[in-house]
Image (cartoon, grey):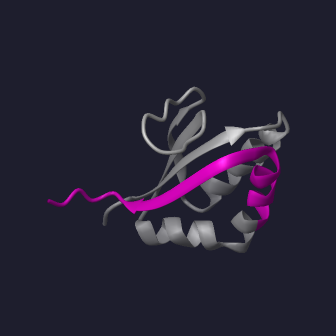
Amino acid sequence: MAKGFWIVTTTITNPAFVEYVEAFQPWVESVGGAVFAKDMEAKTVEGKGGQLAVIIEFPSKQAAIEAYSSAEYQELSKLRWANSSDTNITILDGVVAH
């Protein structure tokens, strides 16, 4: 089965964003996810993005969707919304098919 991913970009607007990060890490692990890559100084070369870019890996695309839709994450995301702006989250399937 193919992995699923969240591709996230955001702009941190408040140092209290660290509270989100500290709560996010154990939560994502509890739902079978893991931070695959993170860059605090990402460069968006096309479109709108933020200085923080993160790729989060899940066991499948469905697991990634369920994690995002969960009541736990929706509550946790309130910390992100309060301390960041211009957030983009894309959920994708890890299969490369041509």
**Which portion, as a residue range, is magenta?**
75-98
Identity of the residue drawn at 60% across and 66% down: 68
Identity of the residue drawn at 72% across and 43% down: 21
**Residue 45 appears in the figure:** yes
- Name the side, left or right, on which 57 lies relative to 83: left
Picture quarter with the N terminus: bottom left
Residue farthest to the front? 47
Q: Does the segment drawn in magenta span residue 41?
A: no
Q: Nearer the viewer, residue 53 or 73?
A: 53
Q: Quadrant of residue 15?
A: top right
Q: Quadrant of residue 35?
A: top right
- Name the side, left or right, on which 66 lies relative to 15: left
Q: Nearer the viewer, residue 12 or 69?
A: 12
Picture quarter with the C terminus: bottom left
- Name the side, left or right, on which 37 lies relative to 84: left
Identity of the residue drawn at 80% across and 45% down: 83
- Residue 11, percent across and down? 67, 39
Q: Quadrant of residue 33?
A: bottom right
**Residue 25 appears in the figure:** no
